[in-house]
Image (spheres, rainbow, N blue to C red):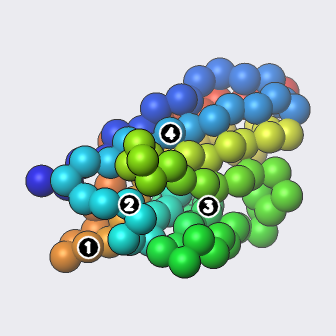
Amino acid sequence: QVQLVESGGGLVQAGGSLRLSCAASGMVISSNNMGWYRQAPGKQREPVAVITTLDTTNYADSVKGRFTISRDNAKNTVYLQMNSLKPEDTAVYYCNTRLDAYYWGRGTQVTVSS
């Protein structure tokens, strides 16, 4: 059974940093594209970053240069390093992958105060 468990969210001041983690089980992250999405109150869930099986990465324009996605295959964990955080980054952040179906974690709340 595939499970994705996010952690690392919290409350931070604007300009601060957080590192989110997504621990995967029931699957091998190195064999699949892994992504981070976020959903702010009253808004649709949107993609933030993806890392492919070839280790290429892509980012939403709004986070380019500030966020970095990476993975540790030995720990079967994907990370999202978030720097220079802004209040508009406030959202619930979700880890995602697609195997036979789309799988999502329960999310971790990130709140950035101004």
Mark drawn on residue 99: 1
Between 98 and 37, the residue placed more toward the observer is 98
> Disc 3 designates what residue?
48
- Which residue corresponds to the image point at 63% horizontal and 35% vertical from the top-left? 19
- Which residue corresponds to the image point at 32% horizontal and 55% vertical from the top-left? 104
| Mark 2 or mark 1, earlier in chain | 2
Instruction: Give the residue type that dot 3 points to.
Output: Val
User: At numbered mark 3, what does the secondary structure look like: helix, strand or loop?
Assistant: strand
> Disc 4 designates what residue?
21
| Mark 3 or mark 1, earlier in chain | 3
Q: Residues within 10 Å of mark 1 (few under 14, many from 20)?
A: few
Q: Nearer the viewer, mark 2 or mark 1?
A: 2
Instruction: Give the residue type that dot 2 points to.
Output: Ile
Q: Position of residue 72 (x, y in %)?
A: 50, 49
- Which residue corresponds to the image point at 68% horizontal and 32% vertical from the top-left? 18
Distance from disc 1 to disc 4, alpha carbons, whole Å, reads 20 Å
